[in-house]
Image (cartoon, rainbow, N blue to C red):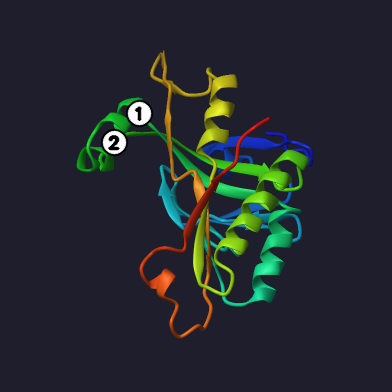
Amino acid sequence: MTVTKDSVITVTAVERFLTEPPTGFSVEVRDSEHGVHSDPEQSLVLIDDFHCSKGKVVFQGSRGSGVKMQNLWEYTSMRKTLLSRRIYLLVSAYEENCAQTNAKEASGARVLQQYVVSINGSDPFIKWQMEKGLDWTISSVVGESYRVDVDLAQLMESWAAKNTDIIIDGLTKVQPVWRDASFTLKYYTDALFDFPHWFGFSKRQFKLRMT
């Protein structure tokens, strides 16, 4: 697995990531737990603890898939990091028909594969999209608490369309449905009467896509 600074997106099966970690990452195994270490000056890891076929996986120093910020300084710092680092997420590929089922059935849909996905936040097109999305969010809820979901589903679909031989179920090529392909920024003010946030009106979302 080769990851260069200019790679817009890399998609690596979790098991391969653990056995062949990319430059800047190392894996420490204790019993059935895999501790993944990375350089915070090079990478922004937004992955919650999870389990895979190799056991429990913990990305040390990860901010998790939901990043909390409580003041303008924390927001400014996170924004700068998003626009200058490689961002690492955990994304799951499910069976295609899970999108056609009801919520109860979808929750039991079979996972085809889990991937560690990285995107280059400093790539000009990715950076432009994130700047535009973040500017729109801030101007929409200035002075209020808010949450914004950054959705990578379209980006993953574009990647899968160019890598149709990657997702294989037995001997059959499968078109996956991408779930958990996002991360969330949560900004909390100390405003006493933050009614829009209380009633769920301060939720925003923007999507990242390929050129």
Up the image or down, 151 lies above or below 140; here it is above
Up the image or down, 104 lies above or below 161; here it is below
Residue matched to label 1 = 95
Residue nearest the observer in this picture, 144 or 48? 144
Q: Earlier in the sequence, mark 2 or mark 1?
A: 1
Amino acid type, callout 1: Glu
Residue nearest the observer in this picture, 130 or 159? 130
Number of marks in picture? 2
Up the image or down, 22 lies above or below 155; here it is below
Q: Secondary structure at mark 2?
A: loop
Residue matched to label 2 = 109
Q: Residue at x 64, y 32 (%)?
A: 210
Q: Secondary structure at mark 1?
A: loop
Q: Residue furthest top?
A: 171
In the drawing, what numbered circle is on residue 80? none
Amino acid type, callout 2: Ala
Name the spot of residue 74 as percent of width and height, x first: 65, 73
Q: Residue at x 31, y 34 (%)?
A: 110
Name the spot of residue 120 as percent of width and height, x first: 71, 44
Check the picture and name the quadrant holding the C terminus.
Answer: top right
User: CB atoms at circles 2 and 1 under 8 Å apart?
Assistant: yes
Up the image or down, 144 lies above or below 171; here it is below
Left or right of 190 in this view: 176: left
Tell me if I can see residue 70 in this picture.
yes
Tell me if I can see residue 65 in this picture.
no
Left or right of 195 in this view: 130: right
Q: Residues within 10 Å of mark 1 (few under 14, many from 20)?
A: some
Instruction: Using the rendered view, name the quadrant where residue 112 is placed.
Output: top left
Residue nearest the observer in this picture, 70 or 52? 70
Name the spot of residue 77 as percent of width and height, x first: 71, 68
